[in-house]
Image (cartoon, coloured by chain):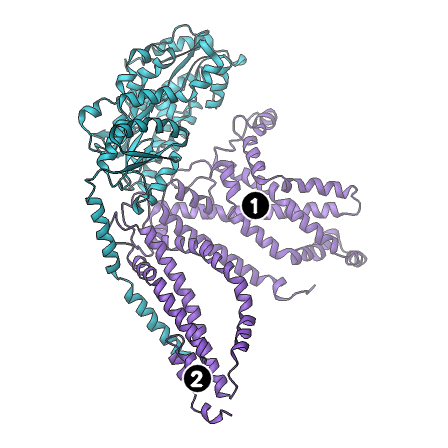
Amino acid sequence: MTANKTYNHQPKLALLLSVIPGLGQIYNRRYIKGSIFMILSIAYLFVFFDMLNIGYWGLFTLGEIPGVDDSRVLLSQGIIALILTAFALVFYIANLLDAKRDAVKILDGREKPSFKTAILNVWDTAFPYLLTGPGLVLLVFVVIFPLLFMGFLAFTDYTLMNSPPKNLLSWVGFDNFRDLITVPIWRTTLFSVLAWTLVWTFVATTLQVSLAMFLAILVNDPRVRFKKLIRTILILPWAVPGFVTILIFTALFNDNFGAINRDLLIPLFGTGVPWLTDPFWARVALIMIQTWLGFPFVFALFTGVLQSISSEWYEAADMDGASKWQMFKYITFPHLMFATAPLLIMQYAGNFNNFNIIYLFNQGGPAVQGQNAGGTDILISWVYDLTFESNQFGMAAAISLILGLIVALFAFFQFRKTSSFKEGGKM
Amino acid sequence: MKKLLALLSILLILLAACGPDREVDEDSDTSNNGDTAADSGQPDSLTIWAIEEQTTEIEEITAGFTAETGIEVEVVPFAMDEQEEAMSLDGPSGRGPDLFYQPGIGNLTLKGLVQPMNVDQEVLDTYSEGSVEALSYEGTVYGLPAVVESLAMYYNKDLVPEPPKTMDELQTIAEDLTDASKDEYGFLYPATDFYYSFPFMAGYGAEIFTEENGIFNVEEVGLASEAAVKGGQLIQSWVDNDFIPKGVTSDIVSGLFNDGKVGVVINGPWALTDYKEALGDSLGTAPLPQLENGEYPITFLGTKGWMLSAYTDYPEAATDLAIYLTNESSLQQYFEMTAEMPAKSAILSSDDFQNDELLTGFGTQLERAKPFPAAPALSAVWDPMEDALTFITEGEDVEEVLNDAVAEIKQDIEMNYK
């Protein structure tokens, strides 16, 4: 046995030696693995040293010579350098842990596995990583990279008047965020748009859910005939592509030529409503359109859940003398909510960022004095305008970060609080 | 675990330390500088970005340049509105063109995409009025114009035998011919579009931004001045008298004109083929009629031309190419192939041009047109003015409406263009 040899084997030493990848493994007498690690590390440094060098320099300074250094390119290189470093760190830590683990194994007196067993072990453990690897790399470069780029932009002063390649960007820290809250025009706009976004989210979603619930319960009543036909018709607003619906509604709501004013309101009331030119009425119109577009999905959802409530509940309640309203409040409503809570939360989050309807209807709505955004702009459509029309990239990025934070926090807290996640099957 | 953290933090510090390492960069920088300084040699070939629809025509013209100078010209098709974005990335990396085609100076100098062109004054004088200005910024020329466009008046000879020369004549025509119930109108144009309505304000003397020697002062927005108000009131009078219905769009205007129901419309050269097909010989063009103060409405002069890239290795050869592409024979050739009006006074005032019934209106109006103000802040003007014009056509007080619009424009400029 190698018992006497292993008393001198120290896992801590293996760990320290692994600062240079491969040395620790060699100390553990895993020569092939050690050399592979060493070769890989040296190759990595060779190939990526330039990129890392320029990347980190670019990230810290964003260029020094205007016209020659392009801050955007340097920023991208910096982010790539960060990503590469992250990958390297993962490998590095794996290497450290591996050396320590192997050293502990030797200390315990286990035999060093043969080369063939080692390969089989690696194949077994690494197989899932091999399969997800390419996907992960793609994800990192296609999703994480642009997100990081935008995130970093929020801390620069990139606007139309200060744009590469002629000018250099510079890090301005939290100035953009501070401006959002202190400069009067930005602050007014931010709070006004935020207020409308919250009102929009809450009212539109609640309305569409309530309408869906009402209709679902109505149609589910045993006395209603042609249920299938009615349900099919009620699903139609969801079936027609949203774009088409919204554009047609815009035409219908047109102040001068739209059917709603021309054929309905003026004959009935003598005067039309300024749907597209007055912020208040534009908002009302939008909420109505969203209710139309959003209720079928929730309707279908609720119909499914309603059919799963066994009629014994209602019979028992009826025998106890409960009124229809009490039955709804204590049986139907809790059943519906419990089963669909996560999906309803998604509806709220979806409406918070419902860019399509706002933009297609009136491109953010009639202009409003005193603020930078339109009358019906929600946060995301305001960011769109800031990016493509005003070229205020720094501010747009800052607002996007705030937006992302709000949605993430909201979703997080709601999911935590909803009982359906804490205790499954309480009903 | 603590040791691990200690190791990691040491590594991070090391990374930060090797970050600001300028040596590698210095080498590449000096080599870049070296390149731009040594452009004295003649190039083998030049690259230009031309719009996709006209690549073949441009290639024919550049063949002449190659024959003369021996320099090959590579014509790359590139959509006009994508060129600016692409230039800002391709230019610095060396993959950009030597010349590219843009409709005006716009934001090009702000982004550093163009460099000043060195052209003799006598060459510059051959271009039509205002066209070189459109491609200049603060007095420096950055490009040479190729084609120009402006609004002009189209009229239906069956309904209006002689084109109106003054506003009064236009008024009479409108009174005689307008019968809204039959969808017949004497005079129609999309009144709420600032591009179409501003010429009337400008004719009374209104300016969007006050200008001095090519430098525009964006602090002073002249769209609520007395002159602008007068222009607005003129437009309002047309709507009040029911000559122009509310909510009319350019589609409606063209549709009715093609049906032969309108006497006079205002539109640009892009509508020429369409109208000619619909009205045939009954179509005529004329410059916009004279206002009662003796001045003519000043339409916007749209110019498209060849801009000199800031990243070209051969600015002199590229300038020569630009001069060649925009000389009289090239533009004449181009005009015959594409029907786009050339930016050359000689051609515009030539007999052929003036005597052609369909071109004479444009030929004259082009010399009375003024280019867009070369200030990025111009983008802030369009939307508020469209709203203002909508309110004007709905009968609101012109001065109030214009004052509101100017306040909005100034606010937008304050936020985004300072």
- Of labels 1 and 2, earlier in sequence is 2
Pointer 1 indicates a residue of which chain? Answer: A
Q: Disc 2 marks which residue?
A: A11
- Packing grade of label 1 (10 A; few <14, some 14-19, many >=20) is many
Q: Quadrant of residue A250?
A: top right
Q: Colour of chain B?
A: cyan
Estimate the x, y position of residue A404 in percent, counting from the top left.
Answer: 46, 54
Q: Which chain is purple?
A: A
Q: Is residue A351 above or below residue A269?
A: below
Q: CA distance from mark 1 to mark 2?
A: 62 Å
Residue placed at 32% from the left, 41% from the top? Answer: B96
Q: Secondary structure at mark 1?
A: helix
Q: Is circle 1 on the same chain as circle 2? A: yes
Question: In the image shown, does A304 or B109 lie closer to the viewer?
Answer: B109
Describe residue B281's horizontal placement relative to residue A221 as left or right. left
- Residue at disc 2, secondary structure: helix
Q: Which residue is mark 1?
A: A204
User: Which-is-in-front pick, marks 1 and 2?
Assistant: 2
Q: Amino acid at mark 1?
A: Ala
Question: Which quadrant of the figure contains the C terminus of chain A?
Answer: bottom right
Q: Measured from the top left, where is residue B403 in percent x and y?
A: 34, 30
* Mark 2 residue type: Pro
